[in-house]
Amino acid sequence: MKARVKATGEIIEVNKVTSYSKDFEVLVYYKGDDGFPYKEEQLDFEDLTQGKADVKEKSLPKNEPDYWEKLKHQYAGMFTKSFLDNCDTSVDPEQIIDDAINMATSLVIKLKLNEES
């Protein structure tokens, strides 16, 4: 199904995933087609009579200042998760966060320059 990422306005394809904690608590999240997990509150769905349905295409205009800032935050989170999933435990978490923010900022700057040219 499709959903809108609240932080960026981007429309993505997601699948509902249900898992269980050690205490057998039900954990529900949505996995994007990019592999990134989203909590339900991070996504917008259009509610119809029963359950969730595809959301209509509508995103933030790219000339809106919030668009680029929200995109940077989303990418920083994705980079941080990737680093944490793939690093050894001796790496300083603050360094991981700084690196993720720097990479996300660089990526957004390049995307914005490409968009303007």
Image (cartoon, rainbow, N blue to C red):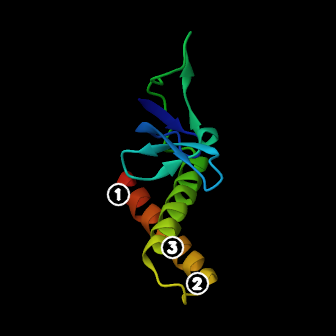
Mark 1 vs 2, N-terminal side: 2
Circles 2 and 3: CB distance less than 8 Å?
A: no
In the rendered image, residue 94, in percent from the top left (x then y), is placed at 63, 81
| Circle 3 residues within 10 Å: few <14, some 14–19, many ≥20 | some
Residue at image point 59% right, 49% down: 65
In the rendered image, residue 56, in percent from the top left (x then y), is placed at 46, 23
Secondary structure, mark 1, is helix
Secondary structure, mark 2, is helix
Mark 2 vs 3, N-terminal side: 3
In the rendered image, residue 58, in percent from the top left (x then y), is placed at 48, 29
Secondary structure, mark 3, is helix
Residue at image point 64% right, 46% down: 25
Mark 3 vs 1, N-terminal side: 3
Quarter of the image with the C terminus is bottom left
Q: Nearer the viewer, residue 97 or 31?
A: 31
Residue indicated by mark 2 = 95
For badge 3, the amino acid type reads: Leu
Indicate whether 20 appears above or below 14. below
Indicate whether 103 appears above or below 117. below
Q: Nearer the viewer, residue 36 or 105?
A: 36
Residue at image point 58% right, 52% down: 70
Circles 3 and 1: CB distance less than 8 Å?
A: no
Residue indicated by mark 1 = 114
Determine the CA span between mark 3 and mark 1: 29 Å
Residue indicated by mark 3 = 84
